[in-house]
Amino acid sequence: MKIDPPRPLTRDEQAFLAGLIGHVADARWQRLDLSSMRVSGMCDCGCSSFDLAVPGEPPAPIYGGRVADLYATTPQGKVVGVILWGADSRLTHVELYSLRDSPPFDIPSPETIADVPPWLDPAV
């Protein structure tokens, strides 16, 4: 679902996005100004995936390339896969997808972001 005009990130979206970027080794992504990003679209299936845009910048391909491929746990306790997409040195999409449970689910807390799902993490 397209959002026009694009809206600012919510506090939860911005915190989660910052957490995802914290897991990315490539420094160019860490220098981005998250406060200038806007949400330009949302998935309507209830998964909380969202498209990103920067005002004044031309639209970039939503699925340009994977910036990060991670996992997180929603406030409902559902483990989800998370792909952070980017193109042309811009973040374009945060994709949350179901691993075991169906949507709806809310934006996970950044503290739950992990490189592997909990059932494969030997530290858990």
Image (tube, rainbow, N blue to C red):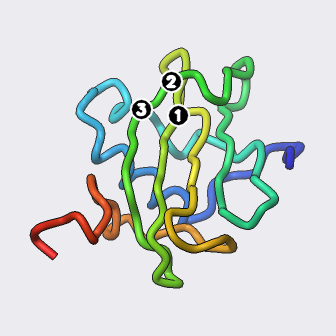
Answer with the quarter of the image where residue 69 lies: top left
Is residue 18 placed above or below 121 in the rendered structure?
above
The amino acid beneath tag 3 is Val
Is residue 32 or residue 104 the one in the foreground?
A: 104
Q: Identify the mark at residue 85; answer none if there is no mark.
A: 1
Image point (45%, 59%), residue name: 16
Tell me if 47 is positioned left or right of 69 in this view. right
**Of pointers 3 and 1, the one earlier in the residue sequence:** 3
Residue at left 57%, top 46%? 94
How many C-alpha atoms fall within 10 Å of the one at disc 2: few (<14), some, or many (≥20)?
A: some
| Camera-side residue of 99 and 18 | 99
Residue count near mark 1 (Cα–Cα under 10 Å), binned few <14, some 14–19, many ≥20: many
Mark 3 and mark 1: span between their CA atoms? Answer: 5 Å
Residue 38 in the image: state x and y as whole percent.
Answer: 67, 44
User: On the image, which quarter does residue 31 sit in?
Assistant: top left
Query: Could you tell me if the residues under marks 1 and 2 are in contact, i.e. CB atoms within 8 Å?
Result: yes
- Find the distance from the CA under tag 1 to the CA under tag 2: 6 Å
Q: Position of residue 34 (x, y in %)?
A: 50, 43
Question: Where is mark 3, residue-wise?
Answer: 67
- Residue depicted at 89% across the width and 43% down the height: 4
Q: Position of residue 107 (x, y in %)?
A: 55, 67
- Nearer to the camera, 14 or 104: 104
Q: Nearer the viewer, residue 68 or 109?
A: 68
The residue located at (48%, 69%) in the rendering is 108
Amino acid under disc 2 = Gly
Where does label 2 land, which residue?
A: 65
Marks 3 & 1, CB-CB < 8 Å contact: yes
Left or right of residue 59: residue 68: left
